[in-house]
Amino acid sequence: MPIPMTGNSSNRAVLITMPHSHYAEKARWALDWLSLPYSEEPHVPLLHRIATTRNGGRSVPVLVHGARRYIDSTEIMVYADSVCGGDRLYPRDTAQRRLVETLEEQFDEVLGPHTRRWAYAQLLPDRGLLRKMMSRGVPRAEASLLPMIMPIVIPAVRAGLRITSDSAQRSMQRVCGIFREVDERLADGRGFLVGGRFTAADLTFASLASPVLLPAGCRAAYPELDEVPATMREEVLRLRDTEAGRFVLRLFSQERVRSQMVTLG
Ligand SMILES: N[C@@H](CCC(=O)N[C@@H](CS)C(=O)NCC(=O)O)C(=O)O
């Protein structure tokens, strides 16, 4: 059972995010799962850097908890697991923990960047949709600046992530490769990737696969399936219809909804 920390404001952690970030969803899911009280502080792209650099980071998510700062989603999960007693997301068993960490690293380093690049390649041309995604829950003043920020952010994302139609296609091939590996791991009928229970490996796979599956229950600000371009929709539906895709949809519908205690603010 979750061990909630006392929920007074001095104990409450702050999670700095961008609304559409899948790495932020990974950290948010971990905090929700562990029932660690926190407030979320979402920012629009570019302005997020004011909040992250002030706390010694760069990308989102960043977790601020008292005097402590965690500037990477994995650091946040490891910290949150330990502060909530340990053995919740990272098994105490050494061999299992090593496998969880190996899978998490592969999903962080390969799956996350490739799902992001492919999804951005589909969505960058639709400014209206991007604006809706990037402004969800952010301070009103930041949302009102988005029309001025987007002409800077869109080319920066294209250049920074080296997005072309070829690179997007290659990213989808890498995503399919990882989905096949997960299919194989699940082929014996197991319900979770490691040790017969939900761990950081499952949470990381589901969160970082979410941009190509747009699962119900995901708290990242994604478009609805019927809002995305037809080519994206077809690919999402095809991926949902794989073992790995069905696994992610199940994790969101069963595990993600178990604990939702965030306060936006
Ligand atoms: N290794 C980092 C990756 C986080 C990441 O790539 N975040 C992206 C959003 S999905 C970001 O903040 N990009 C903008 C930036 O780097 O300033 C983690 O796991 O937290």
Image (tube, grey):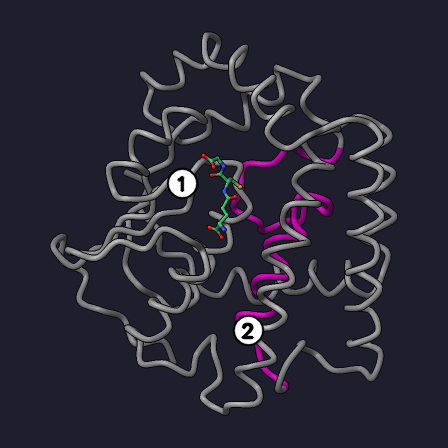
- Quadrant hosting residue 247: bottom right
Q: Is 148 above or below relative to 261? A: above
Q: Quadrant of the N terminus?
A: bottom left
User: For this view, does 52 lie left or right of residue 68?
Assistant: right
Secondary structure beneath dot 2 equals: helix
Residue labelled 1 has its Cβ within 8 Å of some atom of ligand 1: no
- Quadrant hosting residue 49: top left
Q: Residues within 10 Å of mark 2 (few under 14, many from 20)?
A: some
Disc 2 vs disc 1: Cβ atoms closer than 8 Å? Answer: no
Q: Residue at x 27, y 48 (%)?
A: 14
Type of amino acid under label 1: Thr
Q: Residue at x 36, y 81 (%)?
A: 86
Q: Is 134 above or below relative to 104? A: above
Type of amino acid under label 2: Glu
Q: Is 210 above or below relative to 128? A: below
N-term mark: 2 or 1? 1
Q: Position of residue 188 (x, y in %)?
A: 83, 84
Question: In the image shown, does 8 or 113 lie closer to the viewer?
Answer: 113
Q: Position of residue 26 (x, y in %)?
A: 50, 55
Q: Which residue is mark 1?
A: 17
Secondary structure beneath dot 1 equals: strand
Q: Residue 206 magenta-drawn?
A: yes
User: For this view, does 124 lie left or right of residue 185?
Assistant: left
Q: Which residue is mark 2?
A: 101
Measure the alpha-carbon separation of dots 2 and 1.
23 Å
Q: Residue furthest top?
A: 148
Q: Position of residue 52 (x, y in %)?
A: 32, 38
Question: Which residue range is magenta in the image?
Answer: 196-225
Q: Residue at x 61, y 55 (%)?
A: 109
Residue labelled 2 has its Cβ within 8 Å of some atom of ligand 1: no
Q: Quadrant of the C terminus?
A: top left
